[in-house]
Image: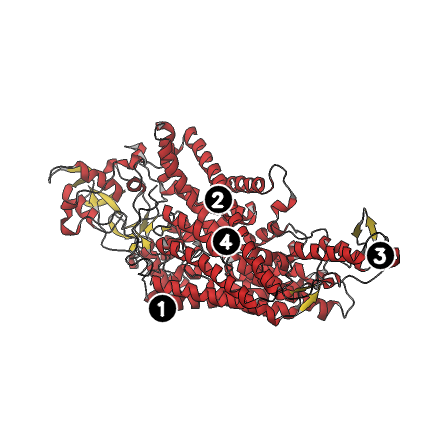
Amino acid sequence: MGIMAGVLPPGFPFGDIKKSGVTEGADYQAINNSRRPELSNTYTRQTGAYAITQWIILALIAIVLACLYRGLNAAIEVISTARMQNLADNMADGHFFVAWVINFFSSLGLVMVAVLFALWAPAAISSGMPEIISYLNGAKPSDLLSPSTMLSKAIGLVFAVSSGLAIGPEGPTIHLGAMIGPRLVESLAWLFSGLPSFSRNVQLFFDDMDMRKLVVAGSAAGIAVAFRSPIGGVFFVIEEAISFFDAQLVFRTYFTCIIAYYIMAVLTDGHRLEADTFTPYEIEVECSAPYLAEDIFLFIITGVVCGAAGSLFNALNTTIFRFRKKFVGASGRNRIIEALCLVLITSLIVVFAPTAGHCTKLRQVVDHVPAQTTDSYVFDSGNLVLDDPKVCLSSTAKDLYRVLHVNRSQWPEDQDLDQVVKELQDKVKENLELRQFDCDEDEYSQLGSLFFNTGHHAVNLLFQTGTYDILEADALAGFLILYFLLAVVTAGATFPSGLVIPMLTMGGAIGRMIGIAVNTGIKEPANVQLMDPGAFAMIGAAAFWCGSGGMTATIAVIILEVTGDFQYLPALAIAVITANVVGTQLNHSLYHSLIHLKHIPFLEDVANEQLNHVTVREVMASPVLSLPALAGRQQIKEALASTHNGFPVTDKADGVDKVIGLILKRHLYTLYDALKGEHDTADLTEFMNETPAFTLEHTRFPEAFRTFRSQGLRHLVVVNDRFEALGMLTRKDFQKADHAHGAHGADDHDHSHDEESSHMHVLHPAVRHPTASSRFAAYRPPPMDDFGDEGPAPLMRNDDSTA
């Protein structure tokens, strides 16, 4: 599979991160050729065998991704739980310095493994989300889907997340899902090379149009397995990732997500599927304090606060990105030093910040329930069932409440009530992941419970309903400030990392504080029904994520699916919409900000309003390199030596050279190789696309932009009224014109790519893999001698590159 094919950069790991080549555009356009139908990328997709092969590959993507994520997540849980439990035990015994030493060196060792793999395959750095979004927009950052990137991402993810840094696994999981399709296609083409019919259908997926389908489905399945949210995965690719889609693609994506979701459930619970399999952040849905219609203003306030906080997170994140690019740069040594500093700062905060907190009596978990006699409640088979609609109590704490308020004279003499209380307290601490820290046995540390847990368990604790006073406002505020700073400086460092868990954690903390403020400042004095801070934590987490990520429906659906709590749907929708409005006004979404900071070729939804009166003639690349229908060897050689990827084909008619089609560079390689003599000619009409996209020279820029983006084009030929080729519009031309007048123009002073996205030399699949499609198998570069000392132009260096 060529995993170790990449050459380590000089001085690895302390030298500069390797860079190469340019970003290429994706060929999503339909190619039609009546003379050679086998070259048409729609001709061979109309068979039943192709359809069956497609569904097989999609199902395999789901199965492989579910198994991979289950294994990676299990490894993360084992390592993280062991580290955190060791830390908690040492802190409980008062061994603060020993706890810090063990935490620091264990975390450092894990992070350094992740950093080394990331330095070897830099495309695995961070979440990969900006690059995936750009790929589905039509640009192909180099090495984004390579085997080395996938290996580095998977291994680095386990070690980085297990280290206890303020990161999560979700973003990298989406990137892993996107990479599985290409790896499966290569593997199946090799494994079944002895079955020509099946292998031929598999090889069709090397084409950009088909590979895009697999990347879309894999990315959505990443959401399905990471959040147990198949519908959220479909919404994600529609709302955020993919720039153009159709109903068939949505159905294929949903099919992949459902398969991945089901396999994850089976791998988690076996053949007996339990409810908690489907809700990783399960909320006590049968236990909630109803809210009033006028509480809509509270949800709007939550959306405003959390949306603004998410936007602030973006602003600081992009500032740190620029700082990292300027002062850390591409140096492997600097990247390693940066990672060491992050581990040092994180370990100091995690270990010593909880010492500033205070110990809390465990009975505070149930203190919000009125202290009435047990006769006021109904008992069913020994379980406490509250008949007061104003009271919400977690099932975990029901038995504890009962024994704390029982009449001791009624307690059976043969049972030690104090021992029962102790056992129930231990059970509550275990179920809620409450950490004792250096407190007494009947107490817990609020800050310790937040810091001495994995990100997943911290979110679970914040989302807990029926435990109103389990976390107090001062502890939440202290945790939020420290964790916010850690998340800002850690995001984008040299290892695989995601930001969703930090966003949920920060938003959950803000939401829970708002819930506490509502109860103490509004509800209680007016003797009105209390509201559950855990529900506000869920709403705040969604609003913060929306204020930072810019998505609305996707986030609402994911939060509802991961918690299983649909009774707060109206509140959630209001807060998310409000957060989106606030976040959009204050800042760009995080992923789109990073796309522009990394200078990845990306076309926004609509063209800049300042270009409404500009014509395509003013922004097109000109003069255009055209080829006659009967082209000589020298003319083809000149085309291959250029940096362009597509060339208009012309034919003389009525005294002018009219455009009759467009031919791609990969087809010219075959024609050039077939020509032996200098005066030989080739008929380009046999290989050209007979239906390329055209636009007239006086077409307004926004209209051409809309045509180019909505159809997923790579080339848009500009012609005059006599159909003569005047110029060419590619992604680079649109981007340059848009950025010259756009909000991101300030970032264009430095077009050097950041190392996370700049490894841009990608060979065509036919060159990478010997069993590529028969349509491409013969396409290979001409001998180097024909191009002098410099050799041929890079195979995929093209007109829409961003070197």
Quadrant into which the N terminus falls: top left
Left or right: where 245 falls relative to 657 = right
Amino acid type assigned to the residue bearing label 1 in the image = Lys
Gap in angstroms between the C-alphas marked 4 and 2: 13 Å
Residue of label 4 = 169
Which mark is on residue 374? Answer: 3
Q: Sequence-wise, which precedes: disc 1 or disc 2?
A: 2
Residue of label 2 = 68
Q: Sequence-wise, which precedes: disc 2 or disc 3?
A: 2
Amino acid type assigned to the residue bearing label 4 in the image = Pro
User: Residue at the spot x=52%, y=65% of the render?
Assistant: 100
Q: Sequence-wise, which precedes: disc 4 or disc 2?
A: 2
**Picture coordinates of residue 786, whole percent (x, y):** 14, 45
Mark 3 secondary-structure assignment: helix
Gap in angstroms between the C-alphas marked 1 and 3: 65 Å
Mark 1 secondary-structure assignment: helix
Observer-side mark, 4 or 1, equals: 4
Mark 4 secondary-structure assignment: loop
Left or right: where 388 falls relative to 283 = right
CB-based contact (under 8 Å), mark 2 and mark 3: no
Q: Sequence-wise, which precedes: disc 4 or disc 1?
A: 4
Residue of label 1 = 326
Could you tell me if residue 582 is visible in this image?
A: no
Gap in angstroms between the C-alphas marked 3 and 4: 45 Å
Left or right: where 289 falls relative to 576 = right
Mark 2 secondary-structure assignment: helix
User: Residue at the spot x=52%, y=51% of the render?
Assistant: 76
**Picture coordinates of residue 467, whole percent (x, y):** 70, 60
Q: Nearer the viewer, residue 539 or 143?
A: 143
CB-based contact (under 8 Å), mark 4 and mark 2: no
Amino acid type assigned to the residue bearing label 3 in the image = Thr
**Picture coordinates of residue 565, whole percent (x, y):** 66, 51
